[in-house]
Image (tube, coloured by chain):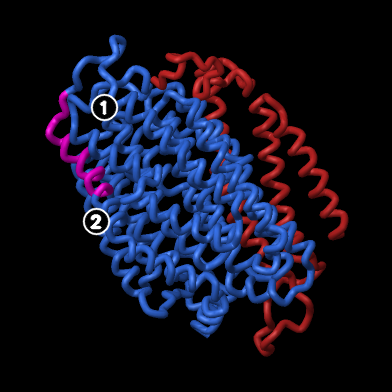
Chain colours: A red, B blue
Amino acid sequence: MTILLCWTAGGLVAISVYLMLSRQLMCWLFGIVILTSTVNLVIFIAGRLQTANPPFVPAHLLVPSQPVANPLPQALILTAIVISFGLLAFTLVLVRKVWQGFNTLDSDNLRLAEPVSRGYHGEETH
Amino acid sequence: MLPLLPVFICLMTAILQCFFWFLPLGKKILHITAAFFLLAAVIWVYYSTLGNHYLILQMGNYPAPFGITFVIDKLSAIMLLVTAFMGLSVALYSLVDRDLIRHSTIFYPTYWFLLAGICGGFSTGDLFNLYVWFEIMLISSFILMTLSDYKIQLDGTLKYVVLNLIATILMLSAIAMLYGITGTLNMAAMSAKLLEINASNLIVSAAALLCLAFAIKAAVFPLFFWLPASYHTTSVSASAIFAAMLTKVGVYALIRVFTLLFIKESYFLHPLMLGAAGLTMLTGVLGAAAQHNLRRILSFHIISQIGYMLMGLAIFTPLAMTATLFFMIHNIIVKTNLFLISGIVRRVKGSFNITRLGGILQNAPFLSFLFFISAFSLAGSPPLSGFWGKLFLLKAAFVQSHFFLAAIALSVSFLTLYSMTKIWHQVFWKAETENGHYGIKPLRLAEKIFMFSPVVLLIILTLYLSFSPQFLFQASNQASIELFNPQNYISAILRSGS
């Protein structure tokens, strides 16, 4: 199971890298979406997979009697999901604003901040 | 509770700012008061770490490797101190920043969330918690960067967002790998585990990922492209606080992981760092030579100076580390000041383009004097603070026979001087050009007070470091000695609370 998940994570990273290399910002954004989810999967694998019981200790024992699942990765993944959701929401709005302002999402055409022509008066900021 | 105090003040201020949403004056008073409170609290924290103390707080009283640990050692304390000074200076300037007039409602709370992220990053002893503070810093900086009325900042922000998002994802996956290897997220416990474990390949790949992530944050050589694309597009206040702290948080994180986690992997990482340091210095300063926008020149110089800090880190002797810390503090102060001065120049002359500027020396000699001190301190002219930083760095390089790197550092210093002379000549010294404005626009009294007071404060700090460098030198020396004895740090954290 672990091996299968590892290969899945590797495949997803490959897909997201391919998407992120695109000049189109929407493709890049989907690449980021896939990559954040893949990293969550990686955290899950890093906490070791167990076909096990929930991490509860019976009242009369000090340690659990059977192997139990690791609760920490779930907390980490939950945090990471919330954070990446916020960042992705911001990025989506930003990409939309860029589309409205520049009428293109091709990153080669977005050169306002770093103009190509290096004219002597060509770099006025505002 | 002391280690939590700086973060607590920042977060409380950010929340209180939201209650003053429709009271502009109340927001401003709160903004300034909080900045002074933060400074006072951080000075208290700093003096508590003198001697051989670590300030340690275990959240929720969980014993060390299980909960989140807040720990402030001497390095964190120095960084917090300089953060509070920069927070105060930029807070003063932001009161009269014209770019922010229509956006001040959002600027003030977000500014305090940004400072909370920075202070949290400096105070935490837990790797995943560090990631969370980085994200708080990141989302606040995204918002601050988009706060002005120009279309250009959309383009700049986009490039900033693209590379920094990838950096945080890399950082998270590296943390996941380290957690998988060691089974803990507490940096002290992780350090102890990493020394025992004999799986060098695995650790090296995690180390490479983590260093890649921090190197993007710190704008190291092949990964710096987001910085000169974005810093000149935003408001002056935002660019000043970004220039002061954001890249340096990356350098701080690199120092932390190099001295604490990846001690055994140094054979692999240090040669890589040495090369990156030299190339970062060179590309930064050469990039600056081709620019005509005042803030773009300064942005490229940030990259160049990150190279100096990396150089000290890569040489990795106590002297080199002392020099890196000294240089970092000096650079934060001077660089913030230069960004603030560029804002004043834009306010009085209406442009950032150095070919259109000119004649400020005749019209505003005091402003020119302030720029002169900062610029030549940045370039490393002898009596000023930059000279001491570079002197210690070069000495460390020569002692370890890194002659080639020292030669690069020296020539980059000359090129920095060239760049500063270019600004001095074009903006201040040269007669006014016909396509620029004649004379200077008058400043209102409030603008005079709040624009010049932070600059003068930072100039005083620069001059203090120039003529009495021993205070900072000793502080950084003690911090670097602590960094080179990580076992004290580890045992202090693992002992406390258990």
Relative to residue A101, is residue B199 depicted above or below? below
Q: Which residue is mark 1?
A: B347
Q: Residue at x 44, y 52 (%)?
A: B390
The quadrant holding residue B490 is: bottom right
Q: Which residue is mark 2?
A: B36
Chain for numbered disc 1:
B
Q: Is residue B420 above or below residue A121?
A: below
Alpha carbon distance from label 2 to label 1: 26 Å
Mark closer to the observer (2, 1): 1
Q: Quadrant of the N terminus of chain A?
A: bottom right
Q: Residues within 10 Å of mark 1 (few under 14, many from 20)?
A: some
Report whether B166 appears left or right of B463.
right
In the rendered image, the quadrant that contains the C terminus of chain A is top left
Q: Amino acid at mark 1?
A: Arg
Q: Quadrant of residue B47?
A: bottom left
| Residue A60 included in the magenta stretch of the image | no
Tell me which residue sits at (32%, 46%) in the image.
B18
Circle 1 sits in a helix, a strand or a loop, which is it? helix
Residue at left offset 65%, top offset 55%: B210
Occupied quadrant, residue A45:
bottom right
| Residue range highlighted in magenta | B442-459
Residue type indicated by callout 2: Phe
